[in-house]
Image (cartoon, rainbow, N blue to C red):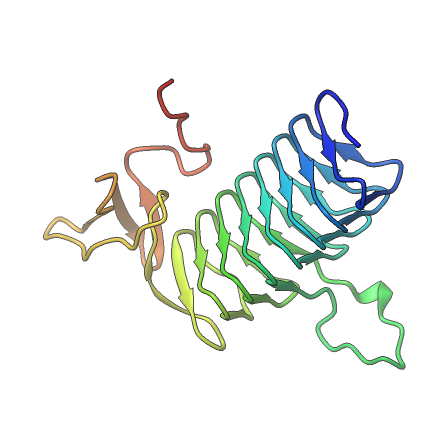
Amino acid sequence: MSTADVLIHPSAIVDQPCELGAGTKIWHFTHVCAGARLGRDCVLGQNVYVGPGVRVGHRVKVQNNVSLYQGVELDDDVFCGPSCVFTNVINPRAGINRRTEFRPTRVQLGVTLGANATIVCGTTIGRHAFIGAGAVVTRDVPAYALMLGVPARRDGWMGRHGYRLQSADAAGIWRCPASQWRYQEISPAVLQCLDWPDDQPLPSPPS
């Protein structure tokens, strides 16, 4: 099944009402619940679940076997690797109903979540952070942070183009090895890009 602007695989289930932006693709065995909102040019891989009220920005890519539960919010240009995990209750018990205790999780612009990473609910992941495969995020993550391990700890900085930043020079400038964009730590553990606004998507490549 498809429309002029949205592709929905015949095996997918899309409950109504929901919002699907132009250019979005929903693949095999994926379930989008009523009340979900997806932006433009998103891709949901196989066996993805999008819960009621979940908001997904533009150009988001969600790989196979990911569940976005109620309370999860993904900003533009977020990448969710295969089988990464979100939670919505901090202390679940099968015999106790905690639906009124869901904690929101915010994943900001340009974040990458590696395969099998776990994001504990109630956290905010700052812009352009990079969560390594298998890492377990238990607290808020600063922008541009490279987070590794269980529990996840910052192990350096990642640039907008997905490369680990080289060591700062004498002037305190960090540089991307691919793009040569410059970054600076404007206060302890607060990094800023000097060559493009932190709150703007990457510029489109020349046609």
For image coordinates 21% across by 55% down, the residue present is 166
For image coordinates 34% across by 53% down, the residue present is 158
Is 60 located above or below residue 70 in the figure?
above
Q: Residue furthest top?
A: 207
Quadrant including the C terminus: top left
Is 1 positioned to the left or the right of 182 in the image? right
Residue 156 image-quadrant placement? bottom left
Is 70 positioned to the left or the right of 72 in the image? right
Is 59 located above or below residue 51 in the figure?
above
Is 125 located above or below residue 74 in the figure?
below
For image coordinates 80% across by 32% down, the residue present is 1
> How many discs appear?
0
**Measured from the top left, where is residue 84 in percent x and y?**
59, 62
Is 138 positioned to the left or the right of 4 in the image? left
Front one among 123 and 78: 78
**Measured from the top left, where is residue 153 in percent x and y?**
42, 71
Is 97 located above or below residue 122 in the figure?
below
**Measured from the top left, where is residue 172 in percent x and y?**
18, 51
**Measured from the top left, where is residue 200 in percent x and y?**
45, 32
Front one among 2 and 174: 2
Front one among 184 and 133: 133
